[in-house]
Amino acid sequence: MRLLVKELSISELAIKLQGAIVGSFNKDTKIIGTCTIDNYVKDKVSFIRNRKYGELLAGLQNAIVLIPKTLSEFCTRYPQNTYIVVQDVLDSLIDLQDYFYRDFNDILEVGISGTSFVDESAIIGEKVYIGENVFIGKNVIIGDGTKILHNTCLLDGVTLGSGTRIYPGVCVYSRCYIGDDCTIDSGARIGGDGFRFEQDIEHKRTMKIQHAGVVKIGNRVEVGANSAVDRATFEDDATVLSDDVKIDNLVHIGHNAKIGPRTLIAAQTCIGGSDKIGEDVWIGIGVTISNGVSIGNRAKILLNAVVAYDVSEDEMVSGFYAMPHRQWKQAWKKLREGYE
C-alpha cells in the first residue's frame, strides 16, 4: 500500500506535459498514477508509443491516455477515451513517473540504530540514517541525508557523499569512495580484491597478486543487487564508475576498469580487468568483455556478445566473438541456411 498518493487533475496533467487535451473529461477527476495500456487502471494515465497498440484503445472506456502527435488519428477513431497529445510520449512518461513515484522507496528515518557500531573517528553528516546491525569503521565520512540500511558494512576510510542510499547487506571495502545521490542495492560488494593469480605449475603453487588500489564511484551512479566492483591493483590507481553510470543486478566489474559517464550495463554482464568503456555506451544482458578491451563512446554491445577485441565509437556489435552487428546477422543467416 502506498503511504503517499499524489494527485493531478487532467488539466494540470496537460499543463505539466505541455500537451493538448482531446475528448471530453470530468474536470474533477484526479489522476493518481500511471499504468500500462493493456492493464488499464481507473484514475491513472496510460500511454501508447506506436501504432501496434492502437487496437487496445478500442476496448477501453473513459481511459486517459498519453499519445504522440504522430498517432493523433486514434483520438477520433476511439473517441470514448480522453487523450493528452504530447510531442514525446517517453519524455512525458518519465516526467510523470518522477512526479508520482520519486518518493516511492524513500527512507524517512534519521538517526543511528542502537544495534549498529559507529567508530568514534567517523564523521557523520546531518539527517543521516544508520540502520540495524550496521558497521561503520575508522575515519569513515558520510554526507548529509545519506541512508544506510541494515546489515551493511563500511570498512575503514570509506567516503559516502550526500543523499546516497545503501540498501541492506552491502559491503564497501576500505578507502573506497561513493559520490552524491547514488544507489547501492542489496548484496553489492564494492572494493573487494580482483581475480589476479599467477600459476607456477613447475612448483605446483598459485600466487595471489595483492590489490592496493580503490574504487571511485561518481555522482548519481546505481549499482544493482549482488553486483561486484573490484578495487584496482596498485595503490595510486582506481576502478572508476563515472557520473550517471547505471549497473543492473549480478554484474561484475573487474579491477582497474574505467567506465565512462552515462553508460548502461544490463544484468549478468562481466566487465574484465583493465577494460576502458567510453561515454553513453549500452551493454546488453549477459555480455562478456575480455580483459584490456576498449569500447568507444556510444557503442552498443548486444545481448550475450563475447567481446575480445576493441570496439570503435558508435559501433554496434553482437555474436561470439562479437563483430559488427550487420556482419553477424549475415553470418547467422548463412549458418541457418546451411542447416535447412
Image: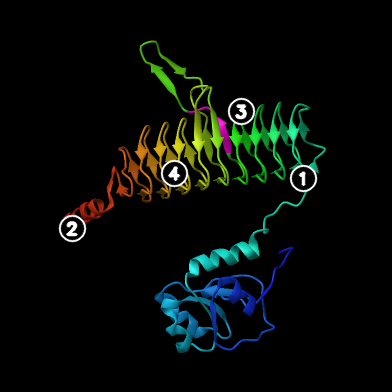
Sequence-wise, the earlier of marks 1 and 2 is 1
* Secondary structure type for disc 4: loop
Q: Quadrant of residue 171?
A: top right
Q: Residue at x 36, y 50 (%)?
A: 300
Q: Quadrant of residue 98?
A: bottom right
The residue under label 3 is which amino acid type? Arg
Residue 157: x and y in percent read 65, 27
Residue identified by numbered label 1: 127
Residue 138: x and y in percent read 71, 26
Q: Which residues are magenta?
A: 189-194
The residue under label 2 is which amino acid type? Glu
Residue identified by numbered label 3: 175
Distance between mark 1 and mark 2 Cα atoms? 64 Å
Q: Which mark is residue 337?
A: 2
Local packing at callout 4 (Cα closer than 10 Å; few below 14, some 14-19, many 20+) is: many
Distance between mark 4 and mark 2 Cα atoms? 31 Å
Residue 153: x and y in percent read 67, 34
Distance between mark 4 and mark 1 Cα atoms? 35 Å
Sequence-wise, the earlier of marks 4 and 3 is 3
Distance between mark 3 and mark 2 Cα atoms? 55 Å
The residue under label 1 is which amino acid type? Lys
Left or right relative to 268: residue 222: right
Sequence-wise, the earlier of marks 3 and 2 is 3
Q: Which mark is residue 269?
A: 4
